[in-house]
Amino acid sequence: MAHLQPEIGSWFEDLDSGLLFEVVAIDELQQTVEVQYLDGTLDEFELDQWQGLPVVSAPPPEDSNAAFGLTAIEQDPNVSGFEFSPGLGPLDTMEGETLPGTDESLY
């Protein structure tokens, strides 16, 4: 088995389980490699252990951000994104200071 060097951001496939994972951290001091699977699970391997793993390089999956969870829009398909009150533009809905003598103080 080839000795693949772990690099942050690299994707690998575990030949035993078929699971894809990404290298997310390498701790040179502790000699460990931290990986994250597509379901969000984190795992850590010692660098010596890494060299014996049955892994091969793999391309990133189509949805490589799946481990980070769903956005609000993905969770609720009825949400269409940002909506502003009728008659108000995006700048009107921003929080900020209201200064006396401006139309903002008429609320």
Image: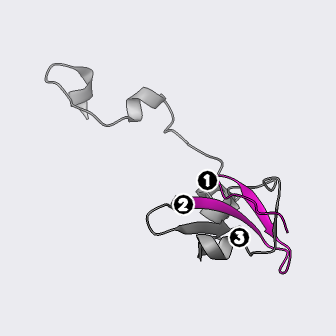
Identify which residue, 105 or 74, lies in the foreground. 74
Q: Is residue 95 left or right of residue 52?
A: left
Identify which residue, 88 or 55, lies in the foreground. 55
Do the residues under discs 1 and 2 have CB atoms within 8 angstroms? yes
User: Which quadrant, please, contains the N terminus?
Assistant: bottom right
Q: Mark 1 or mark 3: name the one nearer the start of the chain.
A: 1
Q: Mark 3 or mark 2: name the one nearer the start of the chain.
A: 2
Is 18 magenta? The answer is yes
Q: Residue at x 69, y 61 (%)?
A: 66
User: What span is in magenta?
Assistant: 1-26
Reading the image, the residue beneath label 3 is: 51
Reading the image, the residue beneath label 2 is: 26
Reading the image, the residue beneath label 1 is: 8
Q: Residue at x 21, y 20 (%)?
A: 102
User: Which quadrant, please, contains the C terminus?
Assistant: top left
Crowdedness of circle 3 by 10 Å Cα count: few (<14), some, many (20+)?
A: some
Residue type highlighted by circle 3: Gln
Farthest-out residue, bottom: 16
Q: Quadrant of residue 23?
A: bottom right
* Mark 1 → mark 2, Cα distance in angstroms: 7 Å
